Amino acid sequence: MVKTDDFSSVFNLRKRIASQHLVMRYRLNEANLTRLGLIVSKKTAKLAVQRNYMRRVLRELFRLNQQHLPAIDLVIQVQKAFDAPNFVQIKQEFESLLLKLSTKIGSRKES
């Protein structure tokens, strides 16, 4: 996702799941694809190198798990900075958030 309106529509819905490092906000969409938006602020990490590393890691984790997700708009915000030694922890957090997300979306589709 690139446009401000896309981000705003996800934020206005106020559906979120959080962990120690990450916050996922989501919204079901009508398009037949899953879209990703990333937020890594300067407040979280001062150096652009650190922010870009976090974006690359999250984009790759999303790419690896994308086929398991329904058609949603997903905005991931980094709450606490992480680096290479924390990769395993971030991967576990990301996967646990996706598991929570799939159970929440699954329960909504049934009702």
Image: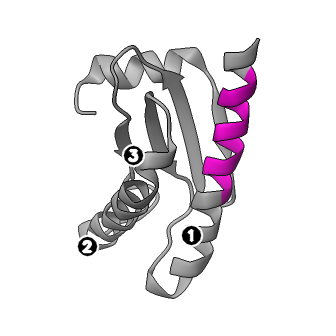
Q: Secondary structure at mark 3?
A: strand
User: Residue 26 placed where, x, y %?
Assistant: 53, 30
Q: How many marks?
A: 3
Q: Is residue 81 magenta?
A: no
Mark 2 and mark 3: span between their CA atoms? Answer: 15 Å
Q: Answer few, some or many: residues within 10 Å of disc 2's Cα (few below 14, many 20 plus, some between 14 and 19).
A: few
Separation (CA) of disc 2 from disc 1 = 18 Å
Q: Residue 15 is drawn in which quadrant?
A: top right
Q: Residue at x 56, y 54 (%)?
A: 79
Q: Which residue is mark 1?
A: 90
**Which element is circle 1 on?**
helix
Name the amino acid, label 1. Answer: Ile
Residue under label 3: 39
For numbered disc 2, what is the local secondary structure?
A: helix
Residue drawn at x 34%, y 24% is 32
Nearer the observer, 103 or 24: 103
Q: Sequence order check: which comes first, mark 2 or mark 1?
A: 2
Q: Is residue 105 left or right of residue 73?
A: right
45 or 32, which lies in front?
32
Extent of the magenta region: 96-107
Q: Which residue is mark 2?
A: 49
